[in-house]
Amino acid sequence: MKPYRDALADDGIPLAQFAVDDVEAEYQRLLASGVVFTQQPTDIGPAMVAVFDDTCGNLIQLIGAKPA
């Protein structure tokens, strides 16, 4: 598992993705708790995404649909 996880992290590919209602709000909440983000909230068209390091060598992506 370690080589797989390391390869994902080296390429900047998130291991997991979690849907949230408001990416910016979650980003601010987690940032205030000391979470280190590798990608700030980013507009990708129909959604916003942000990526953080889970401190175990994994990248985790937050994604949320933009309001209509």
Image (spheres, rainbow, N blue to C red):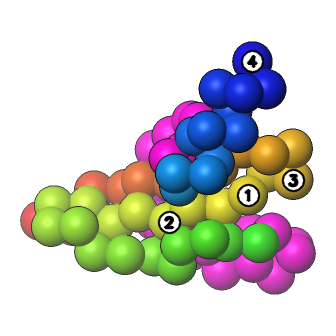
Residue 39 pos. (x, y %): 53, 73
Mark 1 residue type: Asp
Question: Label 4 vs label 3: CA separation?
Answer: 16 Å
Estimate how packed mark 3 is, as few (under 14), some (14 to 19) or many (20 or more) residues with alpha carbons within 10 Å: few
The label nearer to you, 4 versus 3, is: 4
For residue 40, the mark is none
Horizontal and vertical percent for residue 62? 51, 54
**Is 23 part of what is drawn in magenta?**
yes
Q: Which residue is mark 3?
A: 55
SS for dot 1: strand
Residue 41 drawn at (x, y percent): 46, 76
Work out how far the residue at label 2 is from the one at label 1, CA to CA, in angstroms.
11 Å
Quadrant of residue 14 within the rendered picture: top right
Kindly identify which residue carries mark 1: 53
Write down the region rendered in magenta: 13-35
Q: CA distance from mark 1 to mark 3?
A: 5 Å
Q: Is residue 61 among what the camera can see?
A: no
In front: mark 2 or mark 1?
1
The numbered mark, 1 or 4, whose residue comes first in the sequence reads: 4
CA distance for labels 1 and 4: 17 Å
Q: Is residue 6 above or below residue 27?
A: above
Of badges 3 and 2, nearer the viewer stands: 3
Which residue was labeled with disc 2?
50
How crowded pointer 4 is (Cα within 10 Å; few <14, some 14-19, many 20+) is rated as few
